Image (cartoon, coloured by chain):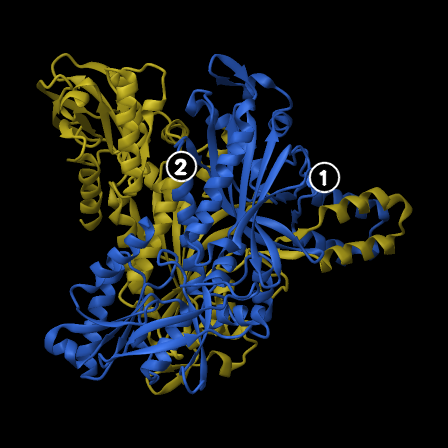
Chain colours: A yellow, B blue
């Protein structure tokens, strides 16, 4: 049903049977639009309109650069779900010897290799220094700066170093048997225009026998690429590529990147590095006894494979990947109607599974039904949007447009017929088909739908 | 079953029917121990032994002070579950108009009231300044410090300011109708011994009509205290108290604290403040049009109720609250045996629901059964501990002691009988009863057990 006619924006041609809300069926050929003049702008605008990101250029800019910004309710939900899915996948992978850890953002001691990490200092000392500057000698100023440094902490710029430092605490959990992994998700500070931003990283630091590290790199690359593609509408826009030898940094002997093709170019979602044993030896000052593990009967220094992804950028990739721009036109007359934007996020990722709306009928009674159903959905862990609370009058057409842009899976309309028969209208985002269902069936139906999509 | 004989440590006397693993029942009076000589040390040691926190004094110290430390797999799981439960509770509360948001740790502009926030600066500029100091004039040094300041960012010390700044972005979502709330969880930087640590906060910023703010403060206090107590073994150790008027800070007109009685004294888990409208007006430079909301037919400036909890300290409270120290002795002979520590975390909170162990039998086949069951449990979202991977030989007694200290709900032993009949032994942490169950029933049984405890 979906074909890629153009590289920069997904365009496709579908023949679809649409059941209108009066129940009549009529056939429509929906031919999807020519290339958007500025797909980047359109995407960022959709992030704001769909309540994924707070309004304001600064937030869209940060997001485009793979940084944390001010997320709205849908953006937060999407990022949370992505992180949950990541945790599920690392814990359930072939080897279950993956332990979750959590390390603080700040460290008080600076270890080698972290000399460039940003420092957190006391603003009061700095301000006082500037106030007193006139009366202080140069030596006194220097002394104050040294005090400032002594009381400073470092902010982490990656999750790798924390995991390496934690290695010795958890290696006994596996009786020093390889392989095993330490997984963590959290914020890392990143350089941004001479200053700093932050990104949500996930990190798996995998400790394995020296001979197997290259195979493990391949294993994790396969698994991770499959994971990214699993939730994609157009999986081919996620791809992996080896890092050329001359671009390898530090002690990496091999590297792979998982990249996504954004309208503004390819960006790295995930870095996989085969790091050998030098980082681990460095962290433990070369004391081999502390880090040795058993590989069969031999004692070895584990090799490290590091798998790091940027989930802020990952979120943006899925937003772009699932956005479909459709221009409906009537086959013969070529009469272009307004553009339809649908955010076809994977059912598992869609931050709102069900939007609840009220149709015609006795407001008070309908509201009670809405509230009951909302509560039922939330209890069952199905995220729902209480659209009925919004009292500005909108047509069903306008509501559908709004919810399609938010990526809402199903829109439920409760009206006077619901009060009579218990039946309500359920519209699917993906098929645009409207069906009648009994109010008692909705929660189960949506749960099964999402679970089904998950197991696909 | 549980009585508080001593304030500083829970001590109780139980008569319990224990079914031994041979199936015989014999009655035992387990009289629980005298006061532990150093309950704080015992608690912190348990956090380390149970893989909640990394070994090392520094981590235990941080945790005791309500700060983030290096969490191990069980600590991370417990904190994640607490945060999940918090999100569920705020989203499902009577009013569902709570929107989740996420704001960055760092801000580039400094707003009023944040003058004391710690600064993030570029370590390279600072180091270079010290290197060049001899050749620089005083004026040049000052100039460099000013450059450093210009490129600096502020680190947040609370989640309130971010929510207030986001208010104008999301108030339209509710058509400027009160009440509604903005919820967020994340790290905040906290002062620690002249330097800084960080704590995991949850924050609900509740915007309501001026007349109702005091009622809302009471409403949220009730709800939050009920939430804390819901997961407690000894609920009375969680309590709330009004903040005396003379201790109110800033623009708070009323305040309530939810506190927990630790062995080292009472500590605040949650602060609830009724803040009036001044913080909001200040954030928007007094531009009333930006912040006005409808209260019925009137336009009003919303009052703010802030509900902030520290989940690192909350975690520690539950660890302490659920730890039972039992000294078993035989009724007549008063023969004291070794102390038994059981971490009776609420079934919903217990980070490991099932530990899988191998008994006697053909190792290869048993391992396959273990792996199959582990996979099934993980697929069903039941956290499981692959104890069978640990090849050091331990007696069942030792394993039970270990898993009781970890707070593992059920220990499953798979042995040669499992291969014959599909039956395995399931031991409950709380009743210490061992039951035979079919391998196909385990996952469903544990899920129902946890769900049942949740709905209690």
In the depicted structure, whether residue A279 falls above or below residue B267 = below
Which of the 4 quarters of the picture holds residue A237? top left
Image coordinates of residue A34 in percent, x first then y, are: 26, 25
Relative placement, left or right, of B77 versus B449 is right
Q: Is residue B387 visible?
A: yes
Image coordinates of residue A8 in percent, x first then y, are: 31, 35
Please tell me which residue is depicted at 55% across the width and 20% down the height of the picture: B290
In the depicted structure, whether residue B451 falls above or below residue A430 = below
What chain is tagged by disc 2? Answer: B
> How far apart are the alpha carbons under marks 1 and 2?
32 Å
Which of discs 1 and 2 lies nearer the camera? The answer is 1
Assess disc 2: are there few (<14), some (14-19) or many (≥20) residues with their C-alpha within 10 Å of its C-alpha.
few
Relative placement, left or right, of B181 versus A442 is right
* SS assignment at label 1: helix
Q: Earlier in the sequence, mark 1 or mark 2?
A: 2
Relative placement, left or right, of A440 versus A321 is left
Image coordinates of residue B123 in percent, x first then y, are: 66, 54
Q: Which residue is mark 2?
A: B93
In the depicted structure, whether residue B208 falls above or below residue B110 = above
Relative to the observer, which residue lies in front, A243 or B130?
B130
Which numbered circle lies on residue B246?
1
């Amino acid at each position: 049903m979906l074909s890629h006619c153009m590289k920069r924006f997904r365009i496709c041609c579908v023949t679809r049977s649409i059941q209108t809300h009066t129940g009549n069926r009529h056939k429509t050929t929906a031919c999807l639009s020519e290339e958007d003049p500025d797909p980047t702008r359109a995407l960022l605008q959709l992030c704001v309109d769909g309540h994924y990101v707070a309004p304001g250029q600064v937030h869209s800019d940060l997001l485009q650069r793979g940084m944390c910004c001010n997320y709205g309710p849908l953006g937060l939900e999407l990022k949370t779900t992505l992180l949950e899915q990541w945790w599920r996948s690392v814990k359930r992978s072939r080897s279950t010897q993956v332990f979750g850890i959590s390390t603080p953002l700040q460290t008080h001691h600076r270890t080698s290799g972290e000399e460039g990490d940003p420092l957190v200092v006391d603003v009061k000392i700095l301000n006082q220094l500037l106030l007193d500057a006139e009366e202080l000698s140069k030596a006194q100023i220097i002394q104050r700066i040294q005090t400032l440094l002594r009381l400073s902490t470092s902010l982490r710029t990656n999750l790798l170093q924390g995991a390496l430092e934690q290695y010795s605490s958890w290696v006994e959990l596996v009786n020093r048997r390889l392989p095993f992994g330490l997984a963590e998700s959290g914020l890392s500070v990143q350089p941004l225009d001479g200053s700093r931003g932050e990104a949500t990283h996930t990190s798996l630091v995998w400790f394995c026998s020296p001979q197997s590290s290259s195979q493990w790199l391949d294993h994790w690359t396969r698994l991770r690429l499959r994971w990214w593609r699993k939730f994609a509408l157009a999986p081919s826009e996620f791809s992996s590529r080896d890092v050329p030898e001359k671009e390898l940094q530090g002690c990496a002997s091999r590297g792979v990147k998982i990249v996504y093709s954004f309208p503004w170019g390819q960006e790295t979602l995930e870095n996989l590095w085969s790091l050998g044993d030098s980082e681990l030896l460095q962290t433990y000052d070369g004391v081999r006894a502390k880090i040795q593990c058993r590989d069969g009967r031999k004692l070895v220094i584990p090799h490290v494979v590091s798998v790091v992804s940027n989930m802020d950028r990952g979120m943006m990739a899925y937003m772009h990947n699932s956005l479909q721009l459709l221009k409906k036109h009537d086959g013969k007359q070529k009469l272009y109607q307004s553009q339809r934007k649908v955010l076809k996020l994977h059912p598992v990722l869609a931050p709102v599974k069900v939007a609840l709306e009220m149709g015609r009928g006795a407001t008070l009674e309908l509201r009670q039904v809405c509230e009951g159903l909302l509560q039922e959905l939330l209890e069952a862990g199905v995220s729902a949007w209480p659209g009925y609370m919004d009292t500005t009058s909108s047509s069903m057409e306008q509501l559908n447009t709004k919810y399609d842009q938010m990526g809402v899976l199903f829109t439920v309309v409760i009206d006077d017929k619901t009060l009579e028969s218990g039946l309500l209208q359920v519209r699917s985002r993906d098929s645009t088909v409207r069906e009648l269902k009994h109010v008692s069936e909705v929660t189960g139906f949506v749960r099964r739908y999402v679970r089904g999509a998950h197991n696909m």
